[in-house]
């Protein structure tokens, strides 16, 4: 419940409504003084035991009503001018993506963003290994094909998919809007987590795979039937028969 702040109850960490710039805003008490002068960004007040002074970090309301963000402004106010309020909703809480974005800016920007998109340093190897395991093919065989530059549907589409994702990730700057653009390009919600993003990448790879197979004369029945909502990678298993059919078709042509 909202209640008036009393001098003997005001504590560091309290959330308060305070007069600021001709209006009122919300802030957090960062220091309480019962004697001396409290100096803030916009002036000073003299503290007494009867009316302690508080240094308050000013919160700024965002474009979303009722949602605040921190500032670097500290003001001095007497307790009598403050009203204790319930804990406000902060921007990080309202939008979970903002916390990792801020962290990426202040720490290792590129690696954090790539991790957010599921594109880690070993993403190529991990994706390749998972896809090959789903198809029951030995990793060494496809790795050798990739290294040797040999043509092969499986090697080609996995390599192209990972290269595309990495290229998109490399273009990122540490703004949430660009991460949102990547999500939009993948057709996933703004709240999509790493697993959802990876699933979307795999789904696009699967759709591309089916299209290529269709162009090579493999019937759609061979590339369909994967249950909706299958776990990431499951649709790749659904392509196993199509890949085998394609291989046998080309082998037959070679023998003729």
Image (cartoon, rainbow, N blue to C red):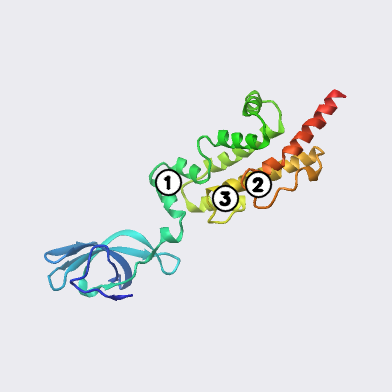
Residue 63 at what x, y percent from top left?
A: 45, 65
Q: Nearer the viewer, mark 3 or mark 1?
A: 3
Q: Is residue 223 shown above or below 51?
A: above
Q: Residues within 10 Å of mark 3 (few under 14, many from 20)?
A: some
Q: Is residue 30 shown above or below 164?
A: below
Total numbered labels: 3
Label 3 and label 2: CA atoms lie apart by: 10 Å
Which element is circle 3 on? helix
Label 2 and label 1: CA atoms lie apart by: 27 Å
Q: Which residue is mark 3?
A: 196
Q: Residues within 10 Å of mark 2 (few under 14, many from 20)?
A: some
- Residue 251 found in image quarter: top right
User: What residue occupies the far right of the structure in this picture?
Assistant: 256
Q: Which residue is mark 1?
A: 104
Residue 111 at what x, y percent from top left?
A: 46, 40
Q: Earlier in the sequence, mark 2 or mark 1?
A: 1
Q: Quadrant of the N terminus?
A: bottom left
Residue 15 at what x, y percent from top left?
A: 30, 67
Residue 134 appears in the picture as rendered: yes
- Cβ–Cβ below 8 Å for labels 2 and 1? no
Which element is circle 2 on? helix
Q: Residues within 10 Å of mark 1 (few under 14, many from 20)?
A: many
Residue 203 marker: 2
Q: What residue lies at 22% left-to-right and 69% top-to-bottom?
A: 10
- Cβ–Cβ below 8 Å for labels 3 and 2? no
Label 3 and label 1: CA atoms lie apart by: 20 Å
Q: Is residue 128 shown above or below 5?
A: above
Q: What residue lies at 29% left-to-right and 60% top-to-bottom?
A: 73
User: What residue occupies the far front of the structure in this picture?
Assistant: 136
């Amino acid at each position: 419940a909202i209640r008036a702040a009393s001098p003997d109850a005001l504590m560091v960490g309290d959330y308060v409504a305070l007069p600021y710039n001709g209006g009122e805003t919300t802030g957090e008490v960062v220091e309480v003084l019962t004697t001396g002068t409290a100096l803030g960004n916009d002036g000073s007040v003299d503290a007494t035991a009867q009316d302690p002074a508080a240094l308050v970090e000013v919160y700024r309301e965002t474009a979303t009503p009722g949602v605040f963000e921190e500032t670097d402004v500290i003001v001095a106010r007497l307790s009598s001018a403050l009203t204790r309020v319930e804990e406000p909703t902060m921007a990080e809480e309202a939008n979970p993506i903002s916390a990792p974005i801020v962290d990426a800016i202040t720490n290792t920007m590129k690696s954090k963003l790539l991790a957010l998109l599921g594109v880690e340093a070993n993403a190529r190897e991990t994706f390749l290994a998972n896809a090959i395991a789903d198809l029951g093919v030995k990793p060494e065989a496809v790795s050798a094909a990739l290294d040797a530059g040999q043509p092969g549907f499986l090697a080609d589409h996995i390599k192209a998919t990972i290269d595309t994702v990495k290229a998109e990730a490399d273009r990122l700057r540490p703004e949430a809007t660009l991460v949102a653009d990547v999500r939009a390009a993948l057709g996933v919600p703004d709240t999509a987590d790493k697993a959802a993003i990876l699933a979307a990448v795999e789904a696009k790879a699967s759709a591309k795979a089916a299209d290529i197979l269709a162009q090579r004369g493999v019937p759609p029945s061979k590339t369909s039937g994967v249950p909706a909502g299958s776990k990431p990678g499951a649709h790749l298993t659904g392509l196993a028969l199509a890949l085998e059919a394609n291989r046998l078709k080309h082998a037959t042509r070679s023998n003729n």
